[in-house]
């Protein structure tokens, strides 16, 4: 998967200005936000991932498409170091996550599929806790939290318990939290699961803005075809194998389908009848 | 969010980043504890039941003897107070591990583990946070015990603090080591029975060891080898402004061993693999 012109331009624009982005200025041009190389993973005899390789460019939106059980969450657990890597290599902006975990994780923001907020703490407390885990001083953390809460439209709820939020609001808060330490790469593992149509659209719009406005590289795992647009990069994962990768139109053309859905069906050779939830 | 200028970051982490992380973890643990009032109350009721009921019935256990660090005859209530303080920490240590198992299942542990700081340090902070919570419980217990005429010298309230921190860390690390070995929440009840009760009863918490020796020399050796005995003795001496060097050495040594073991044994995939990818994504 190549480096795209629009992505390169966005990076040049942002990194060249006064408001340099963290990570960007220290990296040589063209380094991938995320690089997955030859990753395989097994749970005992069961092979969950088989020789996966792809990259996510800075300022790009990469959709990781796969049904439940395709291996998306395993891949996320490997990228976030919750599982040890068995075979292959993962690096974030050139930092190998096994050899330089600190530098790699600094540049990474994650929204896990299960909710990981403290329900009994307030929105602000949740954000401050996360900031502390990244060594961000209390004052700085308070400023950034206020800024992010305003951005997701939850400023007036700062002191409420997270328990009282709706599902969509919790997700927005989780995304805000993932951005607190100003990562350059954002991972989201099926972030719209269980949300209504409007909340889904809001979150998708928000994340796409992060890509265009802030140059963040996004890896968005999903099993919902309609979350993918033509300008995205696409990685198709099925039963632990990578079936396709590339720009969405290229993948569709190669598979000989009319849209992402039909392309996916062709790629998986109809083995998924009734398996899709979308 | 507007991006502000960030100067090139040096590799590694500064001391203040480490401290911010530590205080953040302790602060969150404290907040969580305050939200769980039942946990606080049960943490207090348990030792108080022993103090008010059990101790009243067993006053004769001590017999007539003066044992260090005490300089005079003491009531049985006074004798078991340090043992009960250690018991509070034992339960708290195990409960913290329970919360780590629970956290792990609820995904909160994921938030902790994606922090860029070294994983061993994060787990150490988690243990310190658990210890801090146990200190709140112990001092609350001491306050109530004071009204029950268990009044160590005033300076003792201060000198016992380092002993409590060390014993709290030891018991927390032990709990974490054990929790690394269990895969599911249900198994924890078994661990309580197989760890907490034997450790508590085969120790000097409830009866002085010379009494045990009279009854059973073998049990005496078991008690001597029990790290919990030394936690109790360390606290007992410190509460009276004294140091039991043997206990200090044993507790410090065990803390180091348990801590290193717990950090090495801690494998987040253990808790995640079951519900997560292997169990089928939801």
Image (cartoon, coloured by chain):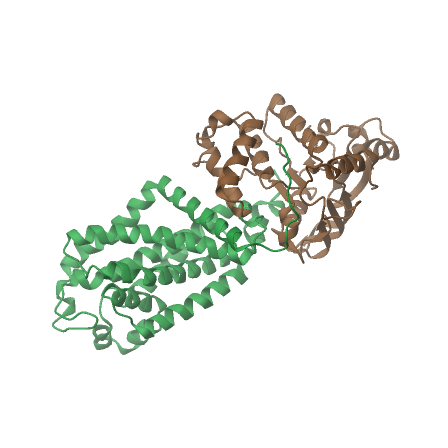
The foreground one among A110 and B196 is: A110
Q: Position of residue A233 (x, y in %)?
A: 78, 35
The C terminus of chain B - image quarter: top right
Using residue A171 as the reference point, say whether residue B141 is left or right of it.
Answer: left
Q: Position of residue B233 (x, y in %)?
A: 28, 68
For image coordinates 23% across by 54% down, the residue present is: B142
Using residue B136 as the reference point, say whether residue A274 is left or right of it.
Answer: right
For image coordinates 40% across by 42% down, the residue present is: B32
The foreground one among B37 and B149 is: B149
| Residue A144 in view of the camera | yes
Q: Position of residue B114 (x, y in %)?
A: 58, 48
Q: Is residue B6 above or below residue B10?
A: above
Task: Give the chain letter for brown.
Answer: A
Q: Residue furthest top?
A: A198
Q: Is residue B57 above or below residue A16?
A: below
Task: Give the chain letter for green.
Answer: B
For image coordinates 14% across by 57% down, the residue present is: B56
Using residue B3 as the reference point, say whether residue B135 is left or right of it.
Answer: left
Q: Residue furthest front?
A: A18
Q: Position of residue B6 (x, y in %)?
A: 64, 43
The foreground one among B281 and A37 is: A37
| Residue A270 in view of the camera | no
The N terminus of chain B - image quarter: top right
């Amino acid at each position: 998967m190549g480096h795209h012109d629009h992505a390169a331009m966005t990076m040049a624009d942002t990194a060249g200005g006064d408001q340099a982005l963290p990570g960007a200025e220290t990296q040589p041009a063209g380094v991938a936000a995320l690089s997955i190389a030859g990753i395989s993973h097994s749970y005992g005899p069961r092979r969950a991932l088989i020789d996966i390789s792809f990259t996510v460019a800075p300022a790009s939106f990469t959709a990781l498409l796969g049904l439940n059980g395709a291996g998306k969450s395993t891949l996320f657990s490997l990228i976030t170091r919750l599982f040890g890597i068995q075979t292959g290599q993962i690096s974030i902006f050139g930092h190998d996550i096994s050899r330089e975990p600190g530098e790699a994780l600094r540049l990474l923001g994650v929204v896990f599929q299960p909710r990981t907020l403290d329900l009994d703490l307030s929105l602000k407390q949740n954000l401050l806790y996360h900031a502390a885990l990244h060594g961000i001083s209390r004052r700085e953390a308070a400023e950034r939290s206020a800024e992010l809460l305003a951005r997701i439209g939850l400023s007036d709820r700062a002191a409420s318990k997270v328990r009282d939020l709706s599902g969509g609001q919790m997700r927005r808060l989780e995304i805000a939290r993932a951005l607190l330490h100003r990562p350059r790469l954002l991972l989201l593992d099926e972030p719209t699961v269980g949300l209504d149509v409007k909340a889904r659209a809001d979150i998708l719009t928000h994340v796409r803005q992060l890509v265009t406005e802030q140059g963040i590289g996004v890896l968005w795992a999903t099993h919902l075809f309609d979350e993918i647009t033509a300008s995205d990069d696409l990685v198709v994962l099925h039963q632990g194998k990578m079936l396709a990768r590339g720009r969405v139109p290229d993948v569709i053309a190669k598979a000989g389908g009319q849209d992402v859905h039909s392309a996916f069906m062709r790629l998986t050779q109809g083995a998924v009848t009734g398996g899709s939830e979308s | 969010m507007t991006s502000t200028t960030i100067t090139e970051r040096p590799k590694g982490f500064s001391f203040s980043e480490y401290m911010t992380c530590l205080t953040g973890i302790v602060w969150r643990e404290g907040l969580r504890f305050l939200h769980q009032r039942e946990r606080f109350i049960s943490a207090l009721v348990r030792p108080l039941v022993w103090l008010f009921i059990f101790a009243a019935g067993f006053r004769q256990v001590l017999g007539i003897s003066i044992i260090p660090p005490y300089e005079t005859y003491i009531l049985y209530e006074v004798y078991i107070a340090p043992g009960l303080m250690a018991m509070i920490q034992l339960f708290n240590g195990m409960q913290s591990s329970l919360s780590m198992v629970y956290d792990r299942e609820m995904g909160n542990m994921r938030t902790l583990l994606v922090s860029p700081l070294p994983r061993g340090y994060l787990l150490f902070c988690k243990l310190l946070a658990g210890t801090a919570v146990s200190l709140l419980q112990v001092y609350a217990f001491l306050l109530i015990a004071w009204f029950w005429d268990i009044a160590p010298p005033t300076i003792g309230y201060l000198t016992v603090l380092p002993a409590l921190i060390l014993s709290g860390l030891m018991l927390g690390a032990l709990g974490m080591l054990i929790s690394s070995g269990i895969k599911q929440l249900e198994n924890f009840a078994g661990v309580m029975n197989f760890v907490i009760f034997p450790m508590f009863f085969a120790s000097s918490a409830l009866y002085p060891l010379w009494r045990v020796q009279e009854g059973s020399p073998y049990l005496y050796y078991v008690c001597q080898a029990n790290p919990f005995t030394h936690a109790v003795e360390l606290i007992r001496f410190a509460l009276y402004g004294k140091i039991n060097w043997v206990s200090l050495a044993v507790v410090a040594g065990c803390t180091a061993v348990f801590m290193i073991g717990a950090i090495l044994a801690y494998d987040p995939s253990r808790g995640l693999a079951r519900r997560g990818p292997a169990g089928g994504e939801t």
